[in-house]
Amino acid sequence: MISKLPAGWTEHRFDSLGSTMDAARDMAESGGGDRVLVRADMQSGGRGRYGRPWMSEAGNLYLTVILRENRPLSDCAQLSFAASLALADAIPLDTVRLKWPNDVLIRGCKTAGILLEAGGEAARPWILIGIGVNVAHHPVDTPYAATSLAAEGLASDLDALCRDIALGIDHWRGIWHKQGATALHRAWLDRAKGVGEPIRVRLRERQLDGVFEALDGDGRLIVRTDDGKRHAIAAGDVFFD
């Protein structure tokens, strides 16, 4: 049974695309509205952070959400936390944890990833939230351990999962609008992996080892190194020992 999206959402469904992000960007630049979801059964050019390829065989969930905000573009990176929380809500397992900045883990293994892009007017931007969920299968040759919902014993309906994610985005976006980024960060930290534990962050030019302390007001990762210094990390790859 197909689960329709919540009221106010529009879906564009394709058998195959190069990338849902590229198709969604074209729609956004052409005036596409708020809460538009672009979904493909397969992608030939799916990608993650830093342009890394994202395996996009049939059976998994590949989508991009278009949102429009009447607030500065600089504020909209917080929607990554809203999307992470929406994904966590949509996966009915106690072992789900969130990994900074944009991964969803089950038993410490990557199950879903999020990619944010934005454009348009700086004061009224559009935001793309790309989401990929390993539902039927997962890659085995990756820098991070990975798993799928099927491998964890969940028989997930893609349409229902898509609806649940949209509902979650509505919910957590509303929290952000009404209560601000701090409320998102607090909820995210409650489900985060590794708070208070050793962490290794691979930056573009160096590696930082320390303890994962918190998030700052902008959602940056706060790492305390052995010398007592606290470092605010805006972008990097996170590893746990």
Image (tube, helix red, strand yellow):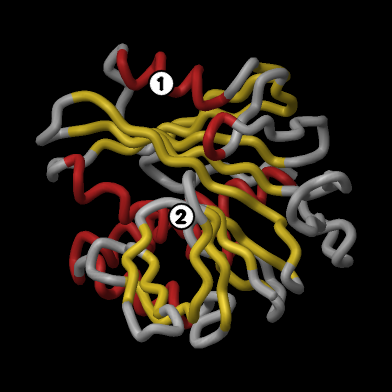
Disc 2 crowd rating (10 Å Cα; few below 14, some 14-19, many 20+) is many
Q: Which of the two residues, 35 or 123, is positioned nearer the viewer here?
A: 123
Q: Residue at x 71, y 58 (%)?
A: 110
In the rendered image of this protein, does residue 13 appear above or below residue 118?
A: above
Element under disc 1 = helix
In the rendered image of this protein, does residue 151 appear above or below residue 96?
A: above
In the rendered image of this protein, does residue 155 appear above or below residue 133?
A: below
Splitting the image into 4 quarters, where does residue 51 fall? top right
Q: CA distance from mark 2 to mark 1?
A: 18 Å
Q: Residue 18: horizontal and vertical position, in percent? A: 64, 16
Q: Which residue is mark 1?
A: 25
> What residue occupies the far front of the structure in this picture?
227
Q: Which of the two residues, 167 or 45, is positioned nearer the viewer here?
A: 45
Q: Which residue is mark 2?
A: 83
Task: Looking at the image, tell me whether mark 2 or mark 1 is earlier in sequence order.
Answer: 1
Splitting the image into 4 quarters, where does residue 91 fall? bottom right
Q: Residue 140: horizontal and vertical position, in percent? A: 88, 48
Splitting the image into 4 quarters, where does residue 25 fall? top left
Q: Residue 70: horizontal and vertical position, in percent? A: 14, 41
In this rendering, would 67 be left or right of 53?
A: left
